[in-house]
Image: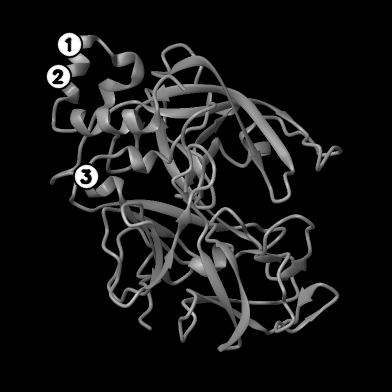
Amino acid sequence: MLLAAEAAKRSLRVSAKGYVPLLCALLALPAIGCAHYASPNGTPDTPVRIPLTVAENPHFGTYSAKITIALGNGKPLPFGFDSGSSGLHAFADAGLDAPGSGVQCTQTPTHVTYGNPPRITFSGVVCYAQLHFAKLSTPAAVPIAYLTSASCPSTNPECRLPNLHSPKAMDGYGIFGAGLTGVMSGDGNVPNPILMLSGRRGTTYNVILTRNGGTLELGGDEPPGSAEFQLEPGTRPGQRYALPRTCLFVNGRATSTCLLISFDTGNGVPWIHSADARDIPQHNGLVTPGTRLGFAPPGAATEATSVVAGTSFADSIRIVDIPGRPPLTNAGIQAFFDRVVTYDDARGVISVGYRTSHVSGLTGSQSILSR
């Protein structure tokens, strides 16, 4: 990358004090989207609510969330909203290298592998562009991984390679990685764009979802009484935090099974890997249908959120032993529904709570349910 993540973030915080439009004029930088600069009312600590869409796959019954973003001078495009990864990854169909796109691309190589175990690898270069959301623009250009080719990893050598130039094949134009536990600097890695914002908006945010819609609340407060999952220290260069730990509940009762957990809106089907799951009712590697699987911080007396095992593709919870991998569960997007999940980069915490008030961005008169 041309800029280290922390240095870039510091420069963004300085430029966010109302000087970006002036700098754009003085430095003649419309090529990186300065012409679109906009700022909502209030200070960088004032919460901003950005709408999310949630849709059910008609074939598999899984749910996915999307966020709409315009990159540089481009039109608004839907990106998958993925709290299980970090960094903005745009596919070739986003056309970032088109004339007049307002995006500046470098020769710095980048790649990302999706799946656990790895299933497909995308490669490209690092680009820079200002991002424009429904109610907010980033104060300056941020790093983007522009992915224009794909390959099969050794763990999945027979994978089917998609057409990265087709929005239909790619189910959108890229992935907006909103997680805190990824590698965000060095070797072509790109940071979570939210963390590039100024003030509280760039350190604390709420993900609020129902099956009908949702909201990304930048600078929002953690609801009172939320259960807090403490992130582990990062173990790789460029990684500040690693996944937190959880202890499982079965039908409201605590078990002895504790393991790492990924709060992942990008995963439609919950799963458990390499865990001592003797306390979980199961048959042929699947959690028994009707079983409510709860997730809580270690030592908590009650579960913070839960999913219910079923018989369909979308709600069958598979228990798989993967040699050499630590015990890990991915709670999937279902664990977010009717909850407020708060990401606090300053404290290294992901919390799960409830909110009773209506939230801007939810469809119709949907509201977050009280406990």
| In this view, 73 is above or below 355 | above
Dot 3 surroundings within 10 Å: few (below 14), some, or many (20 or more)? Answer: some
Quarter of the image for residue 34 reads top left
Secondary structure, mark 3, is helix
Instruction: Say few, some or many: other residues with alpha carbon within 10 Å of mark 1 (under 14 / 14 to 19 / 20 or more).
Output: few
Q: Residue at x 72, y 56 (%)?
A: 325
Q: Which residue is mark 2?
A: 22
Q: CA distance from mark 1 to mark 3?
A: 25 Å
* 1 or 3: mark nearer the eye: 3
Residue 133 visible in the displayed image:
no
How crowded is the residue under tag 2: few (<14 C-alpha within 10 Å), some, or many (20+)? few
Left or right: 7, with 209 as reference point: left
Q: From the image, tell me which residue sits under label 1.
A: 26
Q: Does the residue at mark 1 contact the one at mark 2 (Cβ under 8 Å)? A: yes
Give SS at disc 1: helix
* Quarter in which the C terminus is drawn: bottom left
- Up/down of 108 relative to 308, above or below: above
